[in-house]
Image (spheres, grey):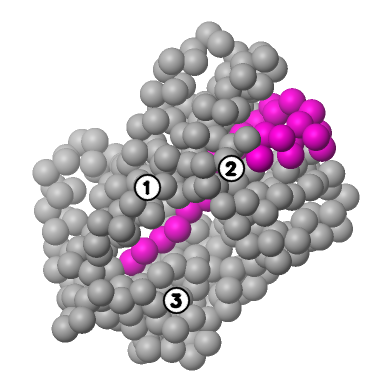
Amino acid sequence: MTGSSRGLGLLIARELAARGCRVMLCARDAEELAAAERKLRATGADVASIPCDITDADAPRRLLDAVHDRFGPLDVLVNNAGIIQVGPMEAFEEKDFREAMETMFFAPVRIALAALPDLRASRAGTLVTISSIGGRIAAPHLLPYVTAKFAAAGFSQGLRAELAGSGVSVTTVFPGLMRTGSHTAARFHGRPGAEYGWFGAAATLPLLSMDAERAARAVVRAAERGRPELVLTPAAKVAVRLQGLAPASMTRLLSVTDRALPGPGQHPRRDVSGAEAAGRSALPRWVTTLGDRAGRRWGEPRPHN
């Protein structure tokens, strides 16, 4: 399972382990990964981990070798790794799009293709792609992210169609905002403090975001039942329905939203961590209390302001 050292990935791994799965964790940060492994082992989970940058060309081979050596053939693959870059279009360059596509599209494609022989052989293999509501609705100020998530969703849905009858089930998940502490792990561009203000509030407030533990349970249930797709959070479901029924109205709504978001500023090309952006933001700390609490519990870095 990729991107499983913290946040939603760690919670999905915990849910899988609770259902008797033996789980191989994968993430770039070896220290965070070791902490995640200890956390799951404390619950009685049969778990191992491998530090790995999934954008490396040899990552699929290394991951599959580690799984085979420790557990045997692979039955379930969850592609969850991701990065979030927040800012206006003017703040991004081609390399930002390439980084997003490598992490959230090309790497998952390579890993999925490498895993298919195992999944086919099991006759009940399961592949789960964690896309995003951003893979259905092109939210402003997240352009590299939504571009990669749209691509990942297309690949996942096409793969399900082509694997029909093979015994391999593919589920595409479209989460809305969840309280995982993701506002502290994102990278901010343009006017970082102002961008953190809207993103931190949206990723934390209950009416806009979802409890990540509940989301993880829903993801695993959908995979168990072989559902083709899952949209999470009421706000995301409303947005998807509006996009389907009235795409022109959704486009106008997104344009209005964009005009309400911060402008690029005098020096839009920035790359600021969530912690640093929080220190520049006027957003009151209490607004992100629920998200900060979830982040501390599930491994996201802590903001400071």
Q: Is residue 99 above or below residue 164?
A: below
SS class, disc 1: helix
SS class, disc 3: strand
How many C-alpha atoms fall within 10 Å of the one at disc 1: few (<14), some, or many (≥20)?
many
Amino acid carrying label 2: it is Ala
Q: Nearer the viewer, residue 221 or 74?
A: 74
- C-alpha span from label 1 to label 3: 20 Å
How many C-alpha atoms fall within 10 Å of the one at disc 3: few (<14), some, or many (≥20)?
many
Residue 83: in magenta span: yes
- Percent of width and height locating residue 5: 65, 57
- Percent of width and height locating residue 140: 24, 59
Q: Which tag, 1 or 2, sits closer to the chain's start?
A: 2
- C-alpha span from label 1 to label 2: 16 Å
Q: Nearer the viewer, residue 4 or 239?
A: 4
Q: Is residue 131 above or below residue 41?
A: above
Q: Which tag, 2 or 3, sits closer to the chain's start?
A: 2
Q: Which residue is mark 1?
A: 101
Q: Is residue 99 above or below residue 119?
A: below
Amino acid carrying label 3: it is Ser
Q: Residue at x 48, y 86 (%)?
A: 285
Magenta stretch: give its range. Answer: 62-86
SS class, disc 2: helix
Marks 2 & 3, CB-CB < 8 Å contact: no
- Percent of width and height locating residue 203: 44, 66
Q: Is residue 143 above or below residue 238?
A: below
* Quarter of the figure that contains the N terminus: top right
Q: Nearer the viewer, mark 1 or mark 2?
A: 2
Q: Which residue is mark 2?
A: 59
Amino acid carrying label 1: it is Met
How many C-alpha atoms fall within 10 Å of the one at disc 2: few (<14), some, or many (≥20)?
some
Q: Which residue is mark 3?
A: 273
- Percent of width and height locating residue 206: 47, 65
